[in-house]
């Protein structure tokens, strides 16, 4: 199964209190159902392409409202040929919507009333239901962290963003064709959201992959830095050797002060040595301690003398 399917399966397996079940079902019904009228009775038709989502919806309907449902499975004719799971409730549609805080004397509400989502656990269950309905998350192997919920209008998308922000998670909205996508890009936000909706196994898998990737990236950065430093040392050493050769060609090499000639000889014999390595070699060969800055100063003086000869 995909990572998204694993998350949805984990949500569908959760044991919840009735108030959280109600909140989760409210999201599922709001996002996947439509109200129907037949022979004076109001019913509901719920559609989903996810068998996990359809099964969870039927389970919650039975647990909370003890209603009779019928299920049809229709294979789509497009290229993907996914199944569409259609749940039909022939009556008491408005009673169910009212019980979920989605229907009042004003008609169908744009989002559940305050009582349904008053508790944080219920708000989290509602968001889990929204993910079950139209959520997806990149596989943790993918370095582009991305979790999203696809929604039908901008007003509702703003509502979901506000609900997520209750938990100090910053979501954004993007328009994609005729849908509005609420999405999270930062790894910390994706991890926090998975924890919020109680997808703990998925969160552990996400964090494991993230730690492994970050460790590999860190090692890669260290390797690249070391390579860059080595290349820098080699370039600097070769430049210094070229300057020393310039002095030699001028016939004035023997006129260099002894300490500068000693440093020049070390550089000629150790073209790829760093300043610290040259300091160690200088001490071993001449029995005199020289600092890194002192070594750099003498090499700079050699270069300056060579430059003066080239003018």
Image: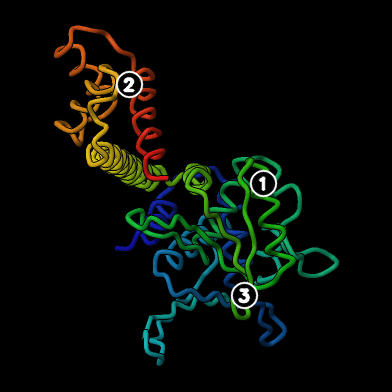
Task: Calculate the distance from the C-alpha at mark 2 to the C-alpha at mark 3.
Answer: 66 Å
Residue located at (42% from left, 70% from top): 50
* Quarter containing the C terminus: top left
Residue drawn 69% across and 84% down?
37
User: Which secondary structure, mark 1?
Assistant: helix
Residues 14 and 36: in front is: 14
Q: What percent of the width, then of the height, locates residue 57? A: 50, 63
What residue sits right under mark 3 in the picture? 179
Task: Report the residue marked by disc 1.
Answer: 165
**Secondary structure found at label 3:** strand
In which quadrant will I find the N terminus? bottom left
Residue 102 position within the rendered picture, expressed as x and y whole percent measured from the top left: 72, 62
Q: Disc 2 or 3, which lies upstream in sequence?
A: 3
Q: Residue at x 72, y 84 (%)?
A: 40
From this viewpoint, which residue is outermost toward the right? 106
- Please name the residue that numbered disc 2 is placed on: 295
The picture quadrant where one finds residue 42 is bottom right
Please tell me how crowded label 2 is: few (under 14), some (14-19), or many (20+) other residues with Cα within 10 Å. Answer: some
What is the CA distance from the residue labelled 3 to the residue labelled 1? 21 Å
Q: Residue at x 66, y 71 (%)?
A: 93
Q: Is residue 150 above or below residue 125?
A: below
Q: Earlier in the sequence, mark 2 or mark 1?
A: 1
């Amino acid at each position: 199964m995909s990572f998204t399917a694993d998350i949805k399966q984990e949500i569908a397996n959760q044991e919840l209190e009735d108030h959280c079940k109600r909140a989760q079902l409210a999201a599922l019904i709001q996002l996947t159902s439509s109200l129907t009228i037949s022979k004076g009775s109001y019913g509901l038709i719920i559609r989903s392409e996810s068998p996990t989502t359809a099964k969870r919806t039927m389970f919650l309907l039975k647990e909370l409202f003890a209603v009779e449902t019928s299920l049809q499975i229709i294979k789509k004719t497009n290229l993907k040929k996914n199944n569409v799971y259609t749940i039909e409730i022939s009556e008491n549609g408005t009673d169910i919507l009212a019980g979920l805080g989605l229907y009042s004397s004003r008609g169908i509400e744009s989002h559940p009333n305050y009582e349904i989502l008053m508790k944080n656990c219920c708000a989290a269950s509602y968001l889990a239901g929204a993910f079950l309905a139209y959520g997806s998350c990149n596989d943790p192997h993918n370095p582009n962290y991305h979790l999203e919920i696809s929604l039908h209008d901008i007003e509702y998308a703003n509502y979901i963003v506000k609900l997520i922000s209750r938990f100090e998670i910053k979501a954004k909205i993007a328009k994609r064709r005729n849908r509005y996508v609420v999405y999270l890009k930062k790894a910390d936000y994706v991890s926090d959201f998975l924890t919020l909706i109680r997808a703990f196994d998925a969160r552990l898998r996400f964090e494991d992959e993230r730690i492994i990737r970050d460790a590999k990236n860190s090692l890669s950065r260290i390797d690249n830095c070391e390579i860059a430093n080595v290349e820098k040392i080699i370039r600097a050493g070769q430049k210094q050797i070229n300057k020393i050769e310039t002095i030699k060609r001028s016939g004035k090499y023997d006129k260099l002060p002894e300490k500068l000639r000693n440093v020049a000889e070390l550089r000629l014999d150790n073209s790829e040595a760093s300043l610290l390595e040259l300091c160690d070699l200088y001490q071993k060969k001449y029995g005199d301690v020289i600092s890194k800055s002192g070594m750099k100063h003498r090499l700079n003086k050699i270069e300056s003398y060579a430059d003066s000869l080239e003018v």
